Image (spheres, rainbow, N blue to C red):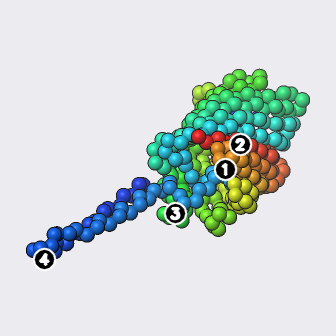
């Protein structure tokens, strides 16, 4: 198992104008015309129709938390299937997201995972734990520009403890763009994600790797608060921080579902299966060295 392959947004103001007119007759008081009402302030993050960020499966929408709002979430991630032997991974991420100021959301998190793996009858189990902070800034709003666009920076550190192979520390920085658009109001939505994850794995000298991901998804609101989605994601692994020295690639497809169970509680789930791929220097039509064959995500989110 390769440790280098482990890991993963203006406010515009309106001006008020007024005019005054004075009566010419001496016996009439002077009068002023009524001042114009102030135009409503507009913001890149104030949308007339919100789209749940988790309505697109593994792909993410562009909306950010309102100022002062807080919401914790718990996410389960599963990864199954490898080329040699067996590999079943299970991870949990606990995150709290807070709207710090207009258009900006900060989300610190802690994570832990366990991989039950074996190859040739030899156990290769692995445990990890770590923490990070996801920072989102919304650059464009759908109401203002027809397209929602959010920039995300996500640094994290993870301790990796593989059985019989010492301990490793992995430092990861994710740089992402989340875009979404309303295709049919209250019915159909689209999202596109671009992501580059840069990873240093050590001890020193630290190995360098990266994973580039492009993803697209459509979400259909079949009834209020209930969304079904379908997505395609393409991922490429590299043994450096850029786009050279390619290690392999994989393409995933799969469905997702999002349910706003109550005003505060939301539940979402997604499944991806690898349908095409190639690991450099290895046989087979899938990359099961750098990526898993099956991916699962289940998320519970609560907002206050």
Please say whether residue 173 is visible from this viewpoint: no
- Secondary structure, mark 1, is loop
Q: Earlier in the sequence, mark 3 or mark 4?
A: 4
How much space separates mark 3 and mark 4, taking CA atoms?
47 Å
Q: What numbered label is drawn on residue 24? A: 4
Is the Cβ of the residue at disc 1 closer than 8 Å to that at disc 3?
no
- Secondary structure, mark 4, is loop
* Residue ID for mark 2: 299
Q: Earlier in the sequence, mark 1 or mark 3?
A: 1
Instruction: Point out residue 303 in the picture as x, y percentages from the top left corner.
Output: 61, 42
How much space separates mark 2 and mark 3, taking CA atoms?
28 Å
* Residue at x-position 80% and y-position 55%: 275
Q: Residues within 10 Å of mark 3 (few under 14, many from 20)?
A: some
- Secondary structure, mark 2, is strand
Instruction: Point out residue 175 in the picture as x, y percentages from the top left corner.
Output: 56, 46
Farthest-out residue, bottom: 25
How much space separates mark 1 and mark 3, taking CA atoms?
20 Å
* Residue ID for mark 1: 54
Is the Cβ of the residue at disc 1 closer than 8 Å to that at disc 4?
no
Instruction: Point out residue 51 in the picture as x, y percentages from the top left corner.
Output: 62, 56
Q: Quadrant of residue 192?
A: bottom right
Disc 3 vs disc 4: which is toward the camera? 4
Q: Residues within 10 Å of mark 4 (few under 14, many from 20)?
A: few
């Amino acid at each position: 198992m390769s440790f280098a392959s482990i890991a993963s947004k203006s406010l515009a103001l309106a001006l008020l104008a007024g005019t005054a007119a004075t009566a010419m007759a001496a016996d009439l008081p002077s009068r002023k015309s009524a001042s114009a009402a102030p135009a409503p302030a507009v913001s890149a993050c104030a949308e007339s129709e919100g789209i749940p960020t988790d309505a697109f499966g593994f792909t993410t929408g562009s909306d950010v938390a309102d100022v002062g709002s807080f919401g914790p979430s718990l996410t389960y991630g599963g990864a199954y299937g490898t080329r040699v032997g067996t590999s079943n991974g299970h991870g949990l991420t606990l995150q709290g997201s807070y709207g710090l100021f207009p258009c900006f959301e900060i989300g610190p998190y802690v994570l832990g995972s366990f991989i039950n793996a074996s190859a040739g009858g030899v156990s290769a189990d692995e445990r990890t734990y770590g923490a990070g902070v996801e920072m989102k800034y919304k650059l464009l709003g759908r109401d203002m520009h027809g397209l929602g666009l959010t920039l995300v920076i996500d640094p994290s550190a993870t301790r990796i403890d593989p059985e019989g192979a010492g301990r490793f520390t992995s430092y990861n920085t994710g740089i992402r763009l989340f875009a979404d658009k309303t295709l049919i109001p209250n019915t159909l939505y689209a999202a596109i994600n671009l992501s580059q994850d840069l990873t240093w794995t050590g001890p020193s000298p630290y190995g360098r790797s990266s994973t580039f991901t492009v993803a697209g998804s459509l979400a259909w609101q079949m009834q209020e608060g209930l969304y079904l989605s379908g997505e395609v994601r393409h991922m490429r692994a590299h043994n450096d921080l850029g786009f050279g020295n390619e290690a392999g690639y994989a393409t995933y497809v799969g469905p997702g579902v999002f349910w706003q169970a109550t005003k505060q509680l939301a539940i979402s789930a997604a499944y991806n299966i690898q349908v095409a791929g190639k690991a450099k220097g290895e046989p087979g039509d899938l990359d099961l060295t750098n990526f898993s064959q099956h991916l699962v995500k289940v998320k519970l989110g609560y907002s206050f």
